[in-house]
Amino acid sequence: MNSLETQVLRLIGENVSSPDVFADTDSGIAQIRASINDALQELCMVTGSYIRTMHLPLLANQQFYKLTMQADYMGYVVQVMDRSRHSKLIRTDLVAVNSNDPYWMQNKGYPMEYMQIGLDYFGICGIPSDDGVVLEMQVVCIPKPYTADTDPLKVREAFQRSGVQLAVSEFYASRGDAARASEYLNKYLETAGIMQLNPQQPERIYQFGGYQGASWQDRRSNGSN
């Protein structure tokens, strides 16, 4: 077990030295490990806090590229720069470019717009005629699940605490204890700073009224001051 899994066992009242319900084996700790992985991946995706820089060399007459990562999953692109021209590409999508220019796939020149298609495909609008253009991309990444006790967890401390709290919440939910499950779910949201995504009450619009008597136009037409 790693330190996060040990914290979960302590919070649910399990014996850390000799676990009863969750033995220190891959099968016994699988539920807790899956919950922690789900929490860490969700937090990185929702907050966009795990950003990596990628450099994409463009090829002549090629418009679409497949982006692959070794250690992480690709989430979404947040910024694309052409450093040689000191310009930022504008984000677009297939519907927009088809509406604006039906012949956009035939346009040659420097890329001015980019689009993300599916999970790992990337496209540009404006096809370079020669090699040599390199795009610098800021990409929000989602870490792959850890599978062993020795795997490093490269996330901030608050997210690690949140992962523990979500695992405890899901443990109590699996046991039918809704009260404790809700308690630790709220702690998970508060620690991670995403409580605003789960508001305590529906949005409301407050309207403040003033004097409800006759308007000044009515009083004037009636001859009153």
Image (spheres, helix red, strand yellow):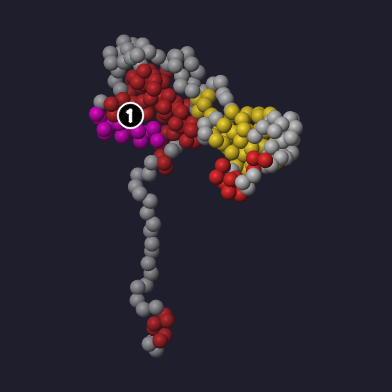
Task: Please report the residue visible at 65 percent of the width from the left and 34 percent of the height from the top.
Answer: 63
> Can the viewer see residue 225?
no
Residue on which disc 1 sits: 169
- Of 119 and 35, the residue lying toward us: 119
The tally of labels here is 1
Instruction: Identify which residue, 70 or 215, lies in the foreground.
Output: 70
Residue 95: x and y, percent?
A: 55, 45
Residue displayed at 71% across by 40% down: 108
Work out whether residue 171 or residue 88 is closer to the camera in this orientation and state it: 88
Check residue 186 for magenta coloring. Answer: yes
Name the image quarter holding residue 208. Answer: bottom left
Mark 1 Cα shell of 10 Å, populated few (<14), some (14-19), many (≥20)? many
Residue 72 at x, y percent in the picture: 53, 24
Q: Position of residue 112 (x, y in %)?
A: 67, 42
Instruction: Decide which of 179, 123 is in the foreground and name it.
Output: 123
Q: Position of residue 109 (x, y in %)?
A: 72, 40
Which amino acid does the dot numbered 1 rest on?
Ser
Q: Is residue 147 magenta?
A: no
Does residue 127 appear in the picture of this structure? yes
Residue 96, compared with residue 73, is above or below; it is below
211 is higher (above) or lower (below) than 17: below
Query: In the rendered view, would you say 89 is above or below 220?
Result: above
What range is drawn magenta here? Answer: 176-189
Q: Is residue 46 above or below residue 152?
A: below
Res 11 quadrant in image: top left
Element under label 1? helix
Task: Identify the residue shown where x is 31% and y is 15%.
Answer: 22
